[in-house]
Amino acid sequence: MRIAKRAPLRTCASCHSKRPKRDMVRIVRTPDGEIRVDITSKLSGRGVYFCPDLKCWRYGLSESRLSRLEYALRGSVSAETRQRLLESFPTLLEMP
């Protein structure tokens, strides 16, 4: 008898809902300090997950949640980087 594998769950850094890893979007701070969206969820570095929902992105990347985001990524996040991440959200929805 074969046992079915469970999909790994991740928690959204904004709304704290738990979803399968493949349904989440990962933001990663690479070893060289660059913060970017990780489409494949395979880049090396420290990551944080968000729901693919604009409301979660706006709240999670807001000024009031900045300290939590910096804690999760273990590094500082500039205002320009947060703006770039927010602007990249619509293109994420178009990807499979």
Image (cartoon, rainbow, N blue to C red):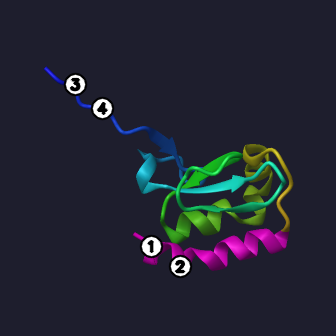
In the rendered view, tell whether residue 79 sits above or below residue 23. below
Name the residue type under label 2.
Answer: Thr
SS majority, magenta:
helix
Q: CA distance from mark 1 to mark 2?
A: 7 Å
Q: Say which residue label 2 marks.
A: 91
Q: Say which residue label 4 marks.
A: 5
Q: CA distance from mark 1 to mark 3?
A: 31 Å
Q: Say which residue label 1 marks.
A: 95
The residue sitting at 59% across, 54% down in the picture is 14
Position of 1 compared to 8: left or right?
left
Q: Which residues are magenta?
A: 79-96
Between discs 4 and 1, the one toward the N terminus: 4
Quadrant (top left, top right, bottom left, bottom right) of the C terminus: bottom left
In the rendered view, tell whether residue 92 sits above or below residue 33. below
Image position, residue 24 (x, y; %): 48, 55
- Residues at marks 3 and 4 touching, judged by CB atoms closer than 8 Å: yes
Q: CA distance from mark 3 to mark 4?
A: 6 Å
Q: CA distance from mark 2 to mark 3?
A: 37 Å
Residue 56 occupies quadrant: bottom right
Position of 94 compared to 13: left or right?
left
Crowd rating for badge 2 (residues with CA inside 10 Å; few <14, some 14–19, many 20+): few
Name the residue type under label 4.
Answer: Lys
Image position, residue 85 (x, y; %): 68, 71
> Residue 57 or 90: which is nearer the viewer?
90
